[in-house]
Structure formats: structure tokens, C-alpha cells
Image (cartoon, rainbow, N blue to C red):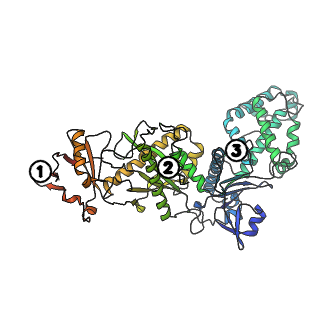
Amino acid sequence: MKILFEGAKYNINDLKSCFGDKFYHQIGDYGYIDVVGYYHSNDNQLYYFLPKLFITEEERFLDTEIYYLDFFKFKIEELLKEDITLLNWFRKFLILFYKSLSEYKSRVDDKIIHLGETLQLSSNIGENEFTFLDLVLTILNFYKKNSDFFVFYIKEQETKKHKKVNWNKTIRKQQPVFINSYPIYDNLNTKTKVVNNDEVLMTYFYSLLNYLKDEYKVDIVIDCPYTLIKGERFKDFLDNGLYKIKKIKNNYYSDKLKAIYNLLILFFERTFVGSIKNKNNDFIVVKHYHNVFEDMIDKLLSDSFSNRKTSNGISLNHLKNNKDGKILDHLFEFESILDNDESIFYIGDSKYYKHNSSISENSVYKQFTYAKNVIQYNIDLLHENIKIPSLINKNIRYRDEVTEGYSISPNFFIQGVIKNINDFENHTLIQNIEKGTEKSAHFKERLFDRDTLFINYYEINFLFVLNAYTNYSQDNIIEIRNTFKNIFKTHFKSYFKNHSGFDFYEFSFKNESDLREFVDFEFRNLTGRIIRTLSQPDKLILAINFNRESKLKEKNLLDRFKVRNNPVAKQKEFMYISSCPIIPSIKDYEF
């Protein structure tokens, strides 16, 4: 078993000898791996092409001192024979990695595989076929899930042997060991004269398990009383085992023994070169692994829109598939930043980059474009009085018709990182504070304007994503999805409260009619700065950026809105100067 890395440079002759002209592109005397995936060769060798994020700028494997080329020069068991901890890590990781490829294949098989002229996923495995590693994992899982059967069966066979002891021969042919005056015979002579095909079958199966354990470094414990076929004898067994297994077929096998027999037949049909069912090689590789990472994140984050339609029958799939051909990575509905009774669509873009790489400016620009498309889609429906169905029983709202203020539309980047090689269980979804929050606005003083947008940066544990993508149940996914949604909302609320440069105030009115009259009167002064929530229709939220307002030559809100600290009352005092007869009561807005 050997490991190569996406984007890494290798000697072209070495690659040709292993893969022919597949899985790489040539530049000069070197070949560069351009796929991520798995390959089982016709000479029974396993190769893994791992994602580029496992290689550092110093060309080492993560935080180890191992050069990436060593994983191709040597088999992994030779390379890591002195580092059992890392070897055990690979045992776990490589199975998860392969299962993630299988999961992706099953998910995209039901979708369009081609994007433009570029093939995302390549495989020579048909819909009802399986890879060699599928078979290996099936055999191992069968052994683990039926451990009770194997223990019981061995004990039962030992008991049957003791019931058929030929005591005359046993006593005549060996000297007993006396313990407390009682004779003990450790080598009983049984009356069995015929070959027990059941035991032969179990011997073959345990020998295969032992081979898989040694060859593919899987983490299983083998405890059996049989004399196993090992080493060179097993290599010969790979050539003639199919014939031997077929010779011991028994119509009276139990269901479990039948399953063991069938698994052995399947395995040796794949490894026996003379079998018509033998496939020279099998592989699952992905040309652009960012599509796989995107699907992994999407499975954990995004809502399903396939069955959701507007009141006039328009599918909400149009939200992810824009008219300009762009497809959003991640989209989900969740509570609005300012009102738990309202919901809005959160828009995410997953980023698959090499170790410690940063996100490009072009990605930031595209993300703002995606957000504007989603906003426009919702506004178009609003103008046509079309109701958008909510998945969480909220009111999806992008624009308040009274203030003409737009709801804050959360956007985020999410990048997979590996900071703890042994952590497969914790998502560690954290905001990257160093990268800050990206902002885009036509009028920087107007928070509730449709062109005012924000993007947060996040990092997530890639190993957790891999584990959850392959092993989480639907209930687990729903649980972690809700956790993620609350994290995103909490971080955006914290940003606007503490770091956005905006201060927030609440204007309260006696009734909704007074509010409307005040808004109409002050609309030109407050446009883009105020919004009303559904849960409190008689209140306005004012967002004011004092620094930005001070730089405006016209429509400066500082001439109308005053905040001062009363040293006597030891509290803030607020004043809004207006000739409007309606006077609101004002206080700090509490998120």
C-alpha cells in the first residue's frame, strides 16, 4: 500500500510504471498527480491519492518530518514501522477516506456528473459493481458484526471434539500430567476420521482475515484455534484457493457459514487471475476534489430545496442554481439576525485549499454576487405577492415594506483545516478573527441597504467533516446542522454588536400608525438606516455609523440624532430632532 498526494511532483518514469498514462499530467521529466482517490492495480497493489491539504509548504506530511515522496518510495508499513501511532492513524483515516469517495460516488450518480466539459468523477465501477476495497471492508465488517457467532462456534466445535474422545488411544499413547492426584491429558485423541469441511472453511476465512490485517493494516483482533495459512503459503493459496474453496461447498451450511463461503468465493474470484470475474484493476478518482469537499460540507449544512415550491409552483432549487449559471455551494434557512420570528437564507462558499493557503479576492467578489442574486430572487417573488415556504415555520423576509429596509443577509466562507491529526470527533468550527469580516456597500452608512453585505471567514476540522460525511446518521446530521446554524448566527450578532462600527438604537411608538407617519416624514433622512421587525411592528431599529456619518456632506444624521451621557442621572440621553409631530421614545437596542 502506497500513498501519493494531489498536485505533488514525482519522477515521470515511476508514475508510468505504476499507472501507465492515468492519474497525472506530465511537465518535462516530472508528473504531477491531478486526482484524488483510490486505485487497486492488476498486480494487487493499493494506491491512495490523498488531498493536497496534507502537504505543507516544506513538502512534508502535515506536522511530521516525513517527506511526501517517502510515502511513494516505500510501503506505508515499512515507512512507519517505528511509528505505530501514525500507522494506526492511517489505518483509520484511509478507510474513512475511501468510504467518503464511495459516498460521493453514490450521491453524484443520482445527479449530473458533468460540469461543462470537465468530468468530476471517474470510475470503472458500474452501478451494481463493487471495488476490491469494498469487498475487503465487507469481509472485515462481517467479522466484527458477528463476533458473537465466531466465539460461540469455536466453543461449540471444541465441545463436540471432547465428546468424541477415544480414551483408549489417548491413555495408551501419552503420559498425563498429574495435578492434585488427577491425571490431565492435553492432547486428546478424537474419533473423527473425516475432514470437517466447516473447520476447513473457518480456517480459510481466518487465514484471509490475517492476510488482510497484515497487507492492508486494518485494525482487527484475530483470536482463533486454527492453524492459519500464512506467508508464502498464503501467496500460493491466492492462486489455488478458489478451487479449494469450491471443493468444500456444503449444502448443509448454516446461514452464517453460507455467508462466509460466499465472501471467500467473491474475494478469490477477484484475486484469481484465471477467473472470468476478475477485473484487472478498479479505481474511484476525482479530478477536482473541491467538488467532493463542497458536497461533504453541503451534506452537513444545506437544506433540501428539491421538494419546496413557492405558492405559484416555482421550485426553490432556483435559489442555488442562478440564472447566470452560477451554483451556490451552500444555502440554508435560519433565524434572522434581528428577529427570531423571521428567517433568511444564509449563503456559504466552501474553500478547499492547500495547507495554510488563503482565500483569493476573486472569491470574495463572487460571493457578494451570489448574495445579491439570492436577494434579487426573493425580492422578485415579493413584488409578485408570491409566498415562499419556510422550512422552520418562520416568515422568510428580505425587505420591510414600511421602512424599505433590507434584512441583513449573512454570508460566509468555510475552509477545511487539519490542526490535530488525531481529532475526528470535534468539528472545531471557529471564526477566523485574523481575516476579519469582508464588507461591501454602495452607501457605507446604510446598513439596511440591499447592497450592504458581509462575509465571515470560518475554519472547520477536515477530519471531522470526513468522519461525519461517511458515518453520521440523518439524526446526527440534523443535530450538527442546527449547531452550525446557531454558531453562524451568534457570530454575526456578535460582529454587529461589537465590531461592525454601527451602534443600534430602538425607536418605540404608541402604535404602528404613529410609526408609519414618522417613517413617511423622515424617510429621506433615515433611508437604509432603519428597519422594522415583524415581531415588533411598533418599533424601529436604527443602525448608525457615527464615524461614517461625520464624513458625509449631505444628509448627515448627526445633525438630527444626538446621544449624550447625563452625569447626574448617570445614564444615556437620546434626542431625535425633527419637525414631525410624532416623537418616539429612544433607547439602546438589545440584541
**Residue at the image point whose x is 18% and y is 56% from the top:** 562
Is 580 left, or right, of 157 in this rendering? left
Circle nearer the viewer, 1 or 3: 1
Residues under labels 2 and 3: Cα distance? Answer: 26 Å
Is 408 left, or right, of 504 in this rendering? right
- What is the x, y in percent for residue 518? 22, 46
- First in residue order: circle 1 vs circle 2: 2
Residues under labels 1 and 2: Cα distance? Answer: 48 Å
* Label 1 sits on residue: 569
Amino acid of disc 1: Ala
Q: Secondary structure at mark 2?
A: loop
- First in residue order: circle 2 vs circle 3: 3
Q: Residues within 10 Å of mark 3 (few under 14, many from 20)?
A: some
- Residue 137 marker: 3
Q: Is residue 12 above or below residue 226?
A: below
Q: Residues within 10 Å of mark 1 (few under 14, many from 20)?
A: few
Amino acid of disc 3: Leu
